[in-house]
Image (tube, rainbow, N blue to C red):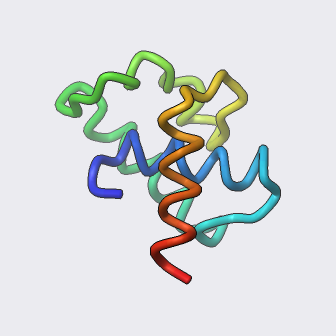
Amino acid sequence: MKNPIARYLMCAYAYYVEDDALIEDAEFDQLAKDILEDYDNIEHPHKPLVTRADLHAGTYLGEYPNIVRGAVKNYRETNK
């Protein structure tokens, strides 16, 4: 989970969809703040999905690309 956008989407999916967080709430909140602070410099194909409003709210209720679902599954299998 190197790119912060990928990490944000993966962590949001794990928390909101699977109800099984990958990271603590405080770490997720900090991740949102960090992304917001550097938003203009971050590049990722899914960046348009994560809006500044999402980051200010510290949440994500949008659609998750299939690659995010697969990445969370893979992350869980690799980090047992």
Q: Is residue 63 above or below residue 11?
A: above
Residue furthest toward the top? 48
Q: Position of residue 17 (x, y in %)?
A: 78, 44
Residue furthest toward the right? 19
Q: Who is closer to the viewer here, 40 or 14?
A: 14
The residue at the point 63 percent across, 72 percent down is 24
Q: Is residue 60 left or right of residue 5?
A: right
The residue at the point 67 percent across, 23 percent down is 62
- The quadrant of the picture occupied by the N terminus is bottom left
Q: Is residue 21 left or right of residue 27?
A: right
Q: How many marks?
A: 0
Q: Is residue 32 left or right of residue 60?
A: left
Q: Position of residue 21 (x, y in %)?
A: 69, 64
Q: Position of residue 80 (x, y in %)?
A: 56, 83
The residue at the point 66 percent across, 40 percent down is 59
The residue at the point 48 percent across, 49 percent down is 71
Q: Who is closer to the viewer here, 78 or 62?
A: 78
Q: Who is closer to the viewer here, 36 or 46?
A: 46
Q: Position of residue 22 (x, y in %)?
A: 60, 67
